[in-house]
Image (tube, rainbow, N blue to C red):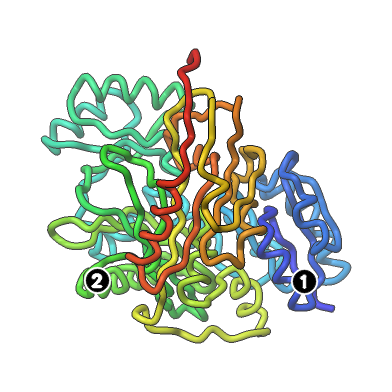
């Protein structure tokens, strides 16, 4: 029996590996609740997945006994670890140089500069003075972000000198010594999900981030994104050029764009499936399971068949974002006429484990709040903890309408609490 190692503990990849007849060794971080995947795993090892040397120490002896075919990482926290360990053990996969160029936003910008596809002003700053200098140079709104991070953590927009000083103080308080600062791009935010086979990059679907007015963090994801044919074609072209520039060979990728009035502009890319249940939405819209393909295609167990981006149906997930405070009442659940799953908030899983009980539902609700709990203010993607509505539709608009009808029927009342 062939075997693989999974570094990180998302459920889908382990489940698919077992369905494909593989022996699965799971390396998971302490506190990651590996019992979620225990039924699909032959051997579990607790280890800090973001530490390549520690993971190498536990996997090398097993590899020398009987080689792993692939070492795979489903999430951002371990993609570099998987590349480092694979390279040191001589296992195929994306190179360390490639993964570093993708994870490090400065290296990604440099790769885009060399390829001529990054007409975005940007700079690395390491002080308040340097941030103020870039603000003066751009003479407009800018954004400060960590060089290696995800989920909008410590990502701060800046419009004037006072905001710049406050932003730098907050940024340093978050533990950062330097950051990437860019001109602020105005327009809708969308992504292109792709799958690469032997260095050829195939577009899989366009995701539209749904946002409330004045809200920086998305409140939902929609497939297929409502993007013009011209913008979509340019997104496909830019993604292919970028992935060639960083040398991506295999597996899923998630490339983020702003649709400016001058056309699509790349924000960043990732050599993994997009977060926030994007894989579930791609599967609902196109019948393509990227998590399964990430395991099966590199091992030659299945082939990837490209599809038209116009062939998808609608699929949407919208997160609950009630007024922050203690929950005093929840009403409307009994009259929805759709499956409802309720569960506690789980910060390490962002509530998405609640997909499993409603996966087969055309429209379903997963609610992670109950009376007495506190609804928190959402400042980044990692705080979308309170549940969601998921819906299929004949097209994108139909899916959104179905989800919004359910959201509107649910009332979550809160009262203020101390900070």
Residue at horizontal 73 percent and vertical 74 percent from the top: 69
Front-most of residues 48 and 91:
48
Earlier-in-chain disc, 2 versus 1: 1
Residue at horizontal 39 percent and vertical 23 percent from the top: 170
Image spot of residue 201 (x, y percent): 43, 76
Give the residue number, with chain letter if any, for mark 2: 234
Q: Quadrant of the N terminus?
A: bottom right
Mark 1 nearby-residue class (10 Å; few <14, some 14–19, many ≥20)? some
**Residue farthest front in this picture:** 335
32 left or right of 337 in image: right
**Residue farthest top in this picture:** 418
Front-most of residues 126 and 347:
347
Image spot of residue 352 (x, y percent): 59, 51
Task: Please tell me in which quadrant of the rendered image residue 355 appears.
Answer: bottom right
SS state under label 1: helix
Q: Which mark is residue 18?
A: 1
Residue at horizontal 17 percent and vertical 26 percent from the top: 160
Question: Is the residue 417 above or below the residue 3 in the image?
Answer: above
Front-most of residues 113 and 41:
41
């Amino acid at each position: 029996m062939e075997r693989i190692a999974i570094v990180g503990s998302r459920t889908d990849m382990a489940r698919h590996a077992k369905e494909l007849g593989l022996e699965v060794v799971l390396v998971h971080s302490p506190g990651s609740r590996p019992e979620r995947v225990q039924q699909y795993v032959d051997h579990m090892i607790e280890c800090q997945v973001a530490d390549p040397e520690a993971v190498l120490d536990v996997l090398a002896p097993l590899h020398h006994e009987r080689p792993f075919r692939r070492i795979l990482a489903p999430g951002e926290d371990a993609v570099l670890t998987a590349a480092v360990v694979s390279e040191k053990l001589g296992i195929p996969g994306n190179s360390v140089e490639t993964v570093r160029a993708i994870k490090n936003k400065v290296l990604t910008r440099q790769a885009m500069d060399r390829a001529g596809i990054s007409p975005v002003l940007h700079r690395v700053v390491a002080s308040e003075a340097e941030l103020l200098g870039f603000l003066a140079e751009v003479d407009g709104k800018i954004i400060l972000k960590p060089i290696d991070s995800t989920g909008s953590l410590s990502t701060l927009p800046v419009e004037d000198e006072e905001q710049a000083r406050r932003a730098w103080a907050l940024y340093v308080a978050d533990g950062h010594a330097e950051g990437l600062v860019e001109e602020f791009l105005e327009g809708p935010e969308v992504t292109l999900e792709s799958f690469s086979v032997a260095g050829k990059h195939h577009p899989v679907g366009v995701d539209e981030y749904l946002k409330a007015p004045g809200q920086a963090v998305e409140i939902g994801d929609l497939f297929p994104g409502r993007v013009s044919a011209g913008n979509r074609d340019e997104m496909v072209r830019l993604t292919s050029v970028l992935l060639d520039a960083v040398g991506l060979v295999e597996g899923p990728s998630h490339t983020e764009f702003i649709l400016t009035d001058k056309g699509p502009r790349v924000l960043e890319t990732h050599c993994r499936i997009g977060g926030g249940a994007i894989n579930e939405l791609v599967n609902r819209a196109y019948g393509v399971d990227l998590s399964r393909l990430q395991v099966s295609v590199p091992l030659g167990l299945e082939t990837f068949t490209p599809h038209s981006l116009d062939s998808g149906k609608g699929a949407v997930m919208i997160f609950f974002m009630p007024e922050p405070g203690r929950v005093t009442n929840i009403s409307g659940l009994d009259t929805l006429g759709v499956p409802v799953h309720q569960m506690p908030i789980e910060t390490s899983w962002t509530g998405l484990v609640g997909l499993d009980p409603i996966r087969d539902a055309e429209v379903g609700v997963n609610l992670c709040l109950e009376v007495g709990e506190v609804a928190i203010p959402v400042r980044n993607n990692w705080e979308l903890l309170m549940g969601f509505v998921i819906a299929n539709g004949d097209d994108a608009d139909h899916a959104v309408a179905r989800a919004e009808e359910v959201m509107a029927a649910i009332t979550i009342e809160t009262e203020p609490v101390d900070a």
